Image (cartoon, coloured by chain):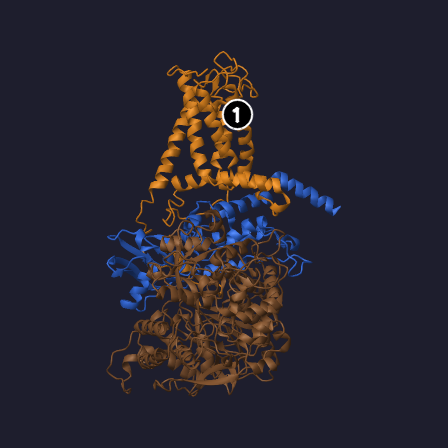
Chain colours: A blue, B orange, C brown
Amino acid sequence: MSSSYQARFKVWRGDTGGGDLTDFTVEVNEGEVVLDIIHRLQATQAPDLAVRWNCKAGKCGSCSAEINGRPRLMCMTRMSVFDREETITVTPLRAFPVVRDLVTDVGFNYDKARQVPSFVPPEGLLPGEYRMMQEDVDRAQEFRKCIECFLCQDTCHVVRDHEENKPAFAGPRFLMRVAELDMHPLDAAADTGLDRKRTAQDEHGLGYCNITKCCTEVCPEGIKITDNALIPLKERAVDRKYDPLVWLGSKIRRRSSAG
Amino acid sequence: MATGTDPQTNSDTSSATRSGGVRAGTRAAIAAPHLRTDRWWLAPAVTAAGLLAFIVYSTWRAFANEYYYAAPYVSPFYSPCLAENCAPMHAGPNWEILGGWWGLSPALIILIFPLGFRLTCYYYRKAYYRGFWASPPACAVAEPHKKYTGETRFPLVLQNIHRYFFYAAVLVAGILTYDTVLAFRDENYRWGHMGLGTLVFLLNIVLIWAYTLSCHSCRHIVGGKLKHFSRHPVRYRMWQFVGRLNARHMLLAWTSLVSVALADFYVYLVASGAFDDPRFF
Amino acid sequence: MSVVDHQEWDVVVVGAGGAGLRAAVEARERGARTAVICKSLFGKAHTVMAEGGIAAAMGNVNMGDNWQVHFRDTLRGGKFLNQWRMAELHAQEAPDRVWELETWGALFDRTKDGRISQRNFGGHEYPRLAHVGDRTGLELIRTLQQKIVSLQQEDHRETGDYESRLKVFQECTVTRILKDGSRVSGVFAYERETGRFFVLRAPAVVIATGGIGKSFKVTSNSWEYTGDGHALALLAGAPLLNMEFVQFHPTGMVWPPSVKGILVTESVRGDGGVLRNSEGKRFMFDYIPDVFKEKYAESEDEGDRWYEDPDHNRRPPELLPRDEVARAINAEVKAGRGSPHGGVFLDVSTRMPAEVIKRRLPSMYHQFKELADVDITAEAMEVGPTCHYVMGGIAVDSDTAAARGVPGLFAAGEVAGGMHGSNRLGGNSLSDLLVFGRRAGLHAAAYAAELSSRPVVDDTQVDSAAAEALRPFSAEGQTADSEAGRPPENPYTLHQELQQAMNDLVGIIRRDGEMREALERLADLRVRARRAGVEGHRQFNPGWHLSLDLRNMLLVSECVARAALERTESRGGHTREDHPSMEREWRRINLLCSLTDPTDGLAATDPVRGQITLTRETTEPVRPDLLALFEKEELVKYLTEEELYE
């Protein structure tokens, strides 16, 4: 194709023992995305270049990497957004331990996923009897668009720049999961004594978030993580923990129900 | 296995301190704190400059204690005026609650509320955390701090009281609305007149209300806290309305900041005699 | 002597897509200690790509729907070749499987009265597909993933260990099923990250690895779809059924080249999108086959009215089963009435307001905007057929999902054959995953529990599996081999040649001579694949992984080519230019593929003989009460005289 050209790439290659940005010159054709170029490198110059990918259509969230220093999906980054003269740098996600080349150990996220208590089905409703209105599921549905690419977890400075915060902070993806469950119209966690609003703060580290919105900026699904999940969750935590009126009300209610 | 779901062992925390930050632990060995090639510093720099300009201007005006009333206009920085040393404003927002002992500029009493509202606002927090604290300076750009505890401790845990400042801000916005109504008088307090200042005040009050109502706490209070919108159709509609405003919260934060300074500056110009308020009718 | 790590489990599930996870949930809930192995990260399986919905006759939108209607649609879609008992179970159980997902936290789109909304789809008589916008597969996989996490949380509360009863081995690949005599004894696998080998000992193995699309050049399938499960079953001695039936989805993207094949969901047509050729004509009206004449609209007006009033109008022919639409597009392009990049136009922009398009088809809007710079609310998409799904697969028992001939081996999902006959209806895949995933997990757990003695893993099998997996690293060093001195082959090149051969020679329209040529090329590739060599070491080495996957793709491709050559008729996902009509005699014939030399004859290079032996088998007659669901006039089109009399 006449519109193809040679592009300059720097791709990080290495493993836990160390590594470096390696220079490549590689052909680029019309309509290609960064992942295509990485595949071409694999097929022609570096057959053992490690990279995760799957659907190649922005639906599975496997090919997360940092392109020119910005966390992105390689399959959704078109080459046409770059200048032909530009050298394009591709590195693995920098918030997680590296495995090899562009592949990182994302186990952190799977650990955090397990720490969020699951959906609690309501008592007395059989399968098929669930009735939910569209306007009641809209909010949670937005969060369920998440493809778990973990770009938000990668870009969040709370853990990216502070390894020591990892045990205490669930990260945007899993705080959003807490919000999703708290907004689920039929979640019955409260009946089992689980207060998701309170645990968001006490157990999942919501207080670490300083709402600088990088998670929203990198989300390839366009989910408004900060405005629609994290801030509403912060407000819900305030209801529980910092609102004297609500606090007083719940005291009185508890007393009257006890008496 | 490392990509598996085994609990992560903390055996490598010793190597985690190898260099810290984005180079911590066994992360990819890349020396540069970031690899962004775009002008990532532009946004925080502009934000910081804008906020700084407002701080300088408002500090000067708040301490000035003069040129804040030019009938029928009262500067939003001095309204309501809660001390005895206020300039008398005919049917204006003079409520001498604090009496005569207050010797400083009366602006300082009332400005705490809008200041607190904006200081704890979810948008401004982002803006100054990024612009002044560099925490982080921009996305995926390493921050310079060794430790970070976010809003988990004093004093930043106080950010959680945003909604009380919101309540106060609604009151202040109410008073500024009253001031705007008063601006439909002439300098002799006769009703039914308008000048350029009236337009400035109108613009300002619309933006102040829009900013105040677009607040995330407001969005929560009117409906966001509900689990079932379908059972509260009116609140659902209010939540949707606030949500639409909320999507422009940043824009409203800036425009209302500029408009309030502009309104004050307009009063300053007229009161100091530097400019004569053009009257329409 | 083997030095690889061994672990003991009751049930091992290979594959973590919809079927695999559903099987794992069921096996664990029935008390079996269950391990899941998947090639990708947990939650990334190809199921996320499913867009349209889950077909289940819940009757939420149209009360007229019930399992009998769904069964009828499924059989019509599959041209009566379906394993009818599977189609029956599928239609009966799908609603329960969908409702169950809600109790695990799934959030489907809703009807006005708060039930699960259902949408129209090709080949389905009523609106039947439970959906979430156009990302239903993602919802399904995430719900199952979260259900697994919830079971692990339960186990953690009881035992202090999340993985005591249910563990996911992610980014691991199984290369061999191990056997003790005829019975399954476990699996041999390697960890992609480290290259380390390990063995999971288990009396029951569920294969749920999905399809074979990566053997074709233009495909909607991801790299994982290399036919692993099909090959594992073959190598373990289980036969594959009707492998000639490969579904080409009519609407894949055709431009830009790097995304060629990526799916454009059928919901685009279900929601009102129409197909036009370069002359602007809605050509599908010219392609309604006789068997469907009474069911589809004759004019554009009638077709358009159907969206509003489905009870008094017939549906537009854009919603014919996929095989019909794919062939029609193929014919239009061939006749020179294609779009600039070799497809046809799929248009929603003139049919719906931009807002509605963005709300109902958000990922499609996104996909075209991001990948092709096309705004589907303003202009038409260019689409063409893409390899999407294999109807053929491991021959299984309808009720238990047990593979034939290998006790302890089960299969569910796309990798299992029979359910969809010669052509799958859209939306029937996700429901298939759930219905038969559950059944496979159930029966695997029961089988494991009933065994009196656990099978033993044979170390020599483990050693030879390890040697086989390591061969690509020593490709150059085989001096004793007759191919000594020749340079090793690049696995990426071999893969590309294989894809090209299958695409060109065993693609959507097939001819005798071409398929013979394909078999020869496959034989040649097989020889060269033995010399596929890789650089570097075993740590996350994609070149090595591909070399190992090549074995599977070559085996499966041969099955497809041989079966396609054998079946001298056109039916569903198998179209012969030299035998263009559907033959009623062929309806009763199943073609079974098995390994010619099960003792390890993979070196066989004879193109005529190859590695696969075909067997013909006559199917069981359809149960009379199920046949009675159809009109006689319809049955005569499919069934032979003698079948009708029976």
Q: Position of residue C34 (x, y in %)?
A: 55, 72
| Image mark 1: chain | B
Where's the C terminus of chain C, which quadrant?
bottom right
Task: Tell which of C137 and C384 is nearer to you.
Answer: C384
- For the question of whether residue A165 can be seen, the reply is yes
Q: Position of residue C70 (x, y in %)?
A: 58, 67
Q: What is the total number of numbered labels drawn onto the structure image? A: 1
Is A146 placed left or right of C502 in the picture? right
Is A167 placed left or right of B132 in the picture? right
Quarter of the image where one finds residue C560: bottom left
Which residue is situated farthest in the top direction here?
B188
Task: Tell which of C630 and C138 is nearer to you.
Answer: C630
- For the question of whether residue A24 can be seen, the reply is no
Above or below, comparing residue A171 to residue A48 in the picture? above
Is C96 placed left or right of C469 in the picture? right
Amino acid type of the residue tagged 1 in the rendering: Thr
Q: Residue at x 51, y 86 (%)?
A: C182
Q: Position of residue A169 (x, y in %)?
A: 49, 53
Where's the N terminus of chain C, which quadrant?
bottom left
Quarter of the image where one finds residue C115: bottom right
Q: Residues within 10 Å of mark 1 (few under 14, many from 20)?
A: some
Residue at mark 1? B177
Circle 1 — which element?
helix
